[in-house]
Image: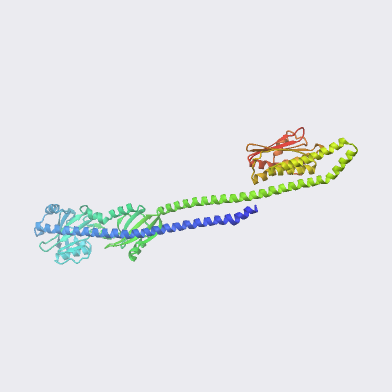
Amino acid sequence: MKLRTSFILWFVVPVTCLLALSNVIYYYTTKQMLMNNHYNEVESFSSNIKVYFEHSQRSADYAEKLLAQNLRLAAMLAQSKLPPRLEQVSNKELTELSKELRVSDITLFQREGDDIVAMRSSNPTQRNISAKEFTDFWFLALKQLLDGKNVSISEGYTLPHYWSGPVDVSSSDPNALHKFGYYHDGQTDYIIDPYFREEDMEEYVTLASYMHIIERLQKEKPFLIEITGFNAERFGEEIYEVKQNNRLVFPHPTRPIYFGQYAMQSDDDVEMVRQAHRDKKTISYQTSVQGSDVIKSFVPIETQLPLVVGLVSDYSYIQNELKRQSERLLTISVVSFLMLGAFVLVLIRRSKLAAAVISAEKIYLENMNSLFTAIRGLNHDVGNIVNAIHAHVQKKEYDELEKVTQAWVKEVVEIQDVVVIRHPTLSAIVQFAASSAIKQKVKLEHDIAVTGDLKLNGEKSLDLIRIATNLISNAFDETVKLPVEERLVQVAAWNTGRLLYFKVSNRGRQIGDEELPQLLSAGYSTKFKHEGLGLQVVKELVQKYKGQLWVEDFESAGATFMFKIHI
C-alpha cells in the first residue's frame, strides 16, 4: 500500500499534471496561431480588396466619363436638329428626338429672372422644375454655362460649353439614379440637357454597385459573411436630406453606405470606420454579433470617394478547427492516460506479485522451520524411542514393540511425503498442516493429486495459501477438542482442466442441518469470543477467482469444507 501511494504521489500525479498543462498550452497556442493566421489572411486579402475596388472605381469613373461624353455628343446632335429659340420647340419634338438619339429624355432649361427653369422636356415630371432648388454647385454650373463661361465646378465632368453632373437622384425622380449632361454654346437661348435614367446605364450601375466584386469575393472566400462599402464621412451621421421642387431628395453621394448589406451591426463600427479612413490602415478585431462569433475588418480604399470596405468573416471556422484539434488532443490524452494507466497497473501488479512471492516464501520458510523443528524434536526422541525398543526387546514385549515402531514409522513417512510434493505452493500448505499436526498431536492424511502443469502466479499462490491455511486452522481448532486417538484432519487437492479443487475434512462435533447454511455467513461463528470473519474472507477470496465454497458433513461427526477456483 505504501508503495502504491508513494508511486501515485511521486509519478502518476506529476505526469498527469504535466499532460494536462501541455494540453492547455497546446490549445491556447493553437488558438493564437489560428487567430494570427486569420488576421494575416485578412491583411493579405485586404491588399487584394484594395486592388479590386480601386480598379473597379476607375472602371466606374471611366464608364461615367463615357456616359458624359455620349450625352455631350447627343446634346450637340440635338442642337443641330432643334430651332435656336425655345418657343419654336415642342415637348413632342423632344420625345421623338430622345428616341432618335437613344437617350432617356431631353430637357431644355432657360433663365427666368434669377432662376433657371426646365421649360421643355420629353419627361413631363421634368417640366417647370427650378434649378435654383438644386444643390448649390449644380445651379452655379448651369448659371456659368448660360453666362458663356467655362464651368469651374470640381464635381462632375467639364468640357468646353458643357458640364455633366455626378450620377445622382433628381427632384423629378428621387428614387432612381440619373446622369445629366448640360450643353450651351450660345447658339440657342436655352441649355440642352439630355440624360440617362438608371435603367439605361446598366453597365455603369453594375460597376458602381460593386456587386460583381462582392459576389466574386464571397465565392473565393466562403468565410466572408458580409461586405459593406462605408462612406467614412457620412456613416454614423444623420441622413442628409433636402427638399427640391416640393420633393424630399436624399442626394446619392452623401449616402452613408455606398454598397452591400449592413446587417451585422456593432456599436464600435462608426469609430472603426473613421479610424481606418483617418489612419489609412486596416483594423481587425473579434466580436460577437447576433449570437455569432465573427471577426470584423475595416479596409480603407484610396479612391475619389471616402470609401472604407467592411468585412465580416465567420469565426466558426476557427472554432471548428479548434474543435478538431481539441478532439485530436483529447484522443492523444486518452491514449496517453490509458498507456499511463496500463503502465501503472503493470508496475502495481509487479509490486503485488513481488509482495505475494515474498509472502509465499515467508510462509514457506515458516512452515519449513516448523517442520524442521518437529523433525529436530523427533531427533531428540530417537534416543528415547531406541531405548524403549531395546527395553521391549529384552522383556520380549513384542506387542508393545510393534505399537512403538508403527507410530514412529508413520510419522517418518508423513514427513517424507511432505518433502516429495513438488509444487511449492501446495508443498507450503501441506508443510503448514504437517507442522500443525505434529504440534497438536493430530492425525493428518493428505492426498495431493495435482498434475505438474499447474501454474499459479504470485498473487493467486498467496490467496490459495490464505484460503487453505484458514480452512486447515479451523479444522485443527475443531478436532483438538477430541481425545488424541480420535483426532483426524484430511487434506486433498486435485485439478480437472482449468479448475483446482481443494478439500479439508476434520473430525469433531456433529453439525446440525440448520447450522450448515449459516457457517458461510458473515459474523457467524461457533468459536468462543471469535468474530467469525475467517470463513467470510475465505468465501470472498474464492469468489475473486470465480470459484465456489461449500460445506458438508464428514463421516459420523465433523465437517468437510470444499472449494474450487479457476486457475
What percent of the width, then of the height, locates residue 455? Answer: 64, 42
Q: Report whether 450 appears left or right of 32.
A: right
What percent of the width, then of the height, locates residue 154? Answer: 22, 65
Q: Report whether 160 appears left or right of 358.
A: left
Q: Is residue 483 visible?
A: no
Camera-side residue of 486 and 428: 428
Q: Report whether 202 appears left or right of 85.
A: right
The residue located at (77%, 47%) in the rendering is 372
The image quadrant that residue 14 belongs to is bottom right
What percent of the width, then of the height, locates residue 143? Answer: 17, 65
| 302 to 485, vertically: above or below | below
Camera-side residue of 259 and 384: 384
In the displayed orientation, state which residue is furthest to the right.
395
Q: Quadrant of the C terminus?
A: top right
Camera-side residue of 447 and 203: 447
Q: Is residue 543 visible?
A: yes
